[in-house]
Image (cartoon, rainbow, N blue to C red):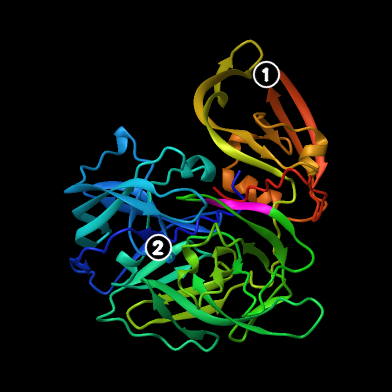
Amino acid sequence: MIKKLLLFFALIISFSSFSQKNFQFLGNKTEKQEIRFKLVNNLIVIPLKVNGNELSFILDTGVASTLLFNLTKKDSIGLNNVKKIMLRGLGRGEPITALTSTKNELKINNIVGSNQDLFVALTEDFNLSAKMGTTIHGIIGYDLLKDVITKINYKTKKIVFYNPKTYQQKKCRKCQEFPLEFYRKKPYVNVAVKIDTVGDLITPVKMLIDTGGTDAMWLFENTKAEIKTPIKYFKDILGEGLSGTIYGNRSKIPHISLGDFLIKEPTVSFLDKKSTLNARRFKERNGSIGGNILNRFKVWIDYPNKKMILKKNGSLKNGFYYNMSGLYLIHDGQELVKEKISNNSTKFYNSKNDRNTISLITKYHYKFKPSFKVDKVLKGSPAYNAGLLKGDIIKKINNKPAYEYQLNEITTMFQSQPSRKIKIIVKRRFKELKFEFRLKKEYKKSANNYWHFFTL
């Protein structure tokens, strides 16, 4: 299951970009456009029309180009001027085959981009929708953000896109402004981190601002910058990029300083060099700041003026946790569920005893509901020790039918609070089995099995 979608799509395109027309505000509302978004595992999912067809895209500051994947016949969008290319992303694998398409129209409400370029990944191994529990068709970043000023409110799940030609920044006493530096169309910010748990050393780092990653932080081990994994850590598979599996170490650090904002004990992933070879091409980059930190702020991302503004919200001091169950689920299609309809009552007058008689008629209907199954169980974890196995179909969690949850809600539950009791009923072959365990902050891990699949 997904815990932290560390899909930091740092795409390296194997040829130069095309020239594109800008996104423009059309109609009467030329100053701003407001939309609601889904927040799934700290990722921002927005509706985006591609050639007139509405699809779901992740808004990702970590990508330079618009990427499409997971298209079905139902989602056919009629791509224009298609050519084959090779794409390389994060991971240890080889580049993948993809398509380029030019002269497409992308639209969000009254913000329209004509003559837009798209890249279409041709791989069936990258099923993002199943891991997120909601349909995802693609990712968009710089192509849109370069032409708007974006205000993200994680609490209300609203985004406002402002027209840079008419926008005036309001005074904000509790806000802090950060200059952005761009490299290959991606924004970087200078911050400070305390990695050493014993001494007082503060390390200045240059971090990618990445709304497309659900982890709190990534750091690249670097002897020159004195960045190395703390003593307490565990090896892990951190995620899956376009080019395969991403490996590294999981740990925590004392704090990160974003200007005057002090964020204590964030979870951090230290990536190995081979998985992130392409991400390290910008030699000054030390890592990334992802959604699990950004969602603690109201965020203004201003590409035209090369700055970012942060205003803390009520969750700034909330703790950071990994998945403390060792259990990872994926969406597994749908199941047909029988549901009771509210009772229909009939009243009539009985002349013999002058009483009302009530007739109750119970009706049922059948609906398709989401089904979840166990994708992985980490050896030595609470779920593993309780007896759960890969392939188990989840029927109930804490006495509530599994289909009444969103996958994101289950993910949040597994990283909520240490010692929380989890009761699960699963279907294994033809039997229903009951399991019970408590979330644990730390647990033993098998030396031969480092699966802790926090991502896709």
Location of mark 1 (residue): 429
Q: Which amino acid does label 1 sit on?
A: Arg
Cα separation between marks 1 and 2: 42 Å
Q: Which of 298/219 is in front? A: 219
Identify the disc placed on residue 63: 2
- Dot 2 crowding, Cα within 10 Å, few <14, some 14–19, many 20+: many
Q: For the N terminus, which image quadrant?
A: top right
**What residue do we see at 42% from left, 37% from top?**
124
Q: Where is residue 325 in the image (x, y as percent from the top left)?
A: 74, 46
Task: Tell me where the magenta segment starts and ends, as one range.
Answer: 236-240
Q: What residue type is labelled 2?
A: Val
Tell me: residue 138, above or below residue 424: below
Q: What element carries label 1?
A: loop
Asked whether residue 190 is in view, the answer is yes
Tell me: residue 360, above or below residue 226: above
**What residue do we see at 52% from left, 89% from top?**
173
